[in-house]
Structures are given as C-alpha cells and as structure tokens.
Image: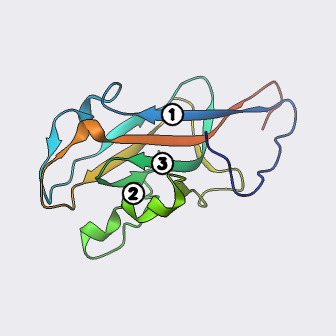
Amino acid sequence: MYRPQFPFPRVASPCEDQPCQFSFDNTNLPALGGSLAAGVATGRIPLRLDKDADFYLRGIRSQGNVSFRLEDPNGNAISDSENAAQVSNFEKPGEYSRTNGAGLVVLEGSQEGLRAPAGGNFLLYLYNSTTGSIALSTVCINLFGVKRYAGKGCA
C-alpha cells in the first residue's frame, strides 16, 4: 500500500477520508489487451473511478516496460505536456527503479492531493520507447489516495 512521505492534513468532521487504491490492468481495462509497437503511442484511455465519493490522488505507481502519461479529470497533464518532442512528455517507470517501486508522488493540486470528482476519470496515454513490441498485458497502473466521504455539512 502507499505510504506518504509527509503527513496530509486531517479532514474535519463530518467528512471522512478512507485510504483507497485503484489498480488498472488487462483484467479490468480492455485497452490493455494486445501489444504496442515500437515508437507508437496509444490514444487516451479513461481510468474510471467509483461513483460513491470524491477521490484525492496522492501517488502513482506503474509496472511494465512502457512509458505513460496521466491527465487529471479536467485534461491537465500530471506529467509534462509542454515539450516540443512529444516523446519527452511521458514518464518512464524504469527511471524510478531505485525507489523499489515506490512510484511518483503527486504534488500538484491541493494540500490534500489531486481531486477527482465522484464518477470522474483520469486519462492514461502509453508510449513504447523501446525498439520492440510490448505486450500491454504486462502493464499495471496503480493510483493511491483517499476517498472523501461527505457527511451533512462537509465541505
């Protein structure tokens, strides 16, 4: 499970935060079937979230030998999207191998994490920067954070 490197503020009552992890792979995301040819990028792949509560993204972890780009529910890139070379707008999981799979920490958004409304979705793009084809069945994206359940009077 995800363990933040610094404390997040406690939510005031009557709101309640519950730790949550969304995991996407070829068992629940049909777009991760098949393979991705060398030098090719996918179109946008929606990562659908539950409808019961807002989700605050606090960390990302990916597995597989493919680079990824993630956008928030409003279409804002979490990884860089302003580079002239489109290839450099993707994160490479191998660059974070020394963290033993700890993944990336999301600092954008607010003090509580990057908010996605209940029923919203993040957008995933994949890119094969290798010289061979990659089986997308090896790809797994994990989103770590909290679901915020709102009681009466919760902001």
Q: Which mark is residue 61?
A: 3
Spot occupied by residue 107 in the image (x, y as percentages of width and height): 61, 61
Looking at numbered disc 1 in the image, what kind of residue is underneath it?
Answer: Phe
Q: Residues within 10 Å of mark 2 (few under 14, many from 20)?
A: some
Q: Which residue is mark 2?
A: 93
Q: Nearer the viewer, residue 149 or 141?
A: 141
Which residue is at 85% across, 29% downward? 14
Looking at numbered disc 2 in the image, what kind of residue is underneath it?
Answer: Pro
Q: Which mark is residue 22?
A: 1
Q: Which mark is residue 30?
A: none
Spot occupied by residue 48 in the image (x, y as percentages of width and height): 43, 32
SS at mark 2 in the image: helix
Spot occupied by residue 65 in the image (x, y as percentages of width and height): 29, 52
Considering every residue shown, the one lying at the far bottom of the view is: 84
Q: Which of the two discs, 3 and 2, labels the residue nearer the N terminus?
A: 3
Q: Is residue 91 visible?
A: no
SS at mark 1 in the image: strand
Quadrant of res 84: bottom left
Looking at the image, is 151 positioned above or below residue 57?
Answer: above
Q: Nearer the viewer, residue 151 or 28?
A: 28
Q: Is residue 53 left or right of residue 74?
A: right
Separation of residues labelled 1 and 3 (CA atoms) = 10 Å
**Which mark's residue is nearer the viewer, 1 or 3?**
3
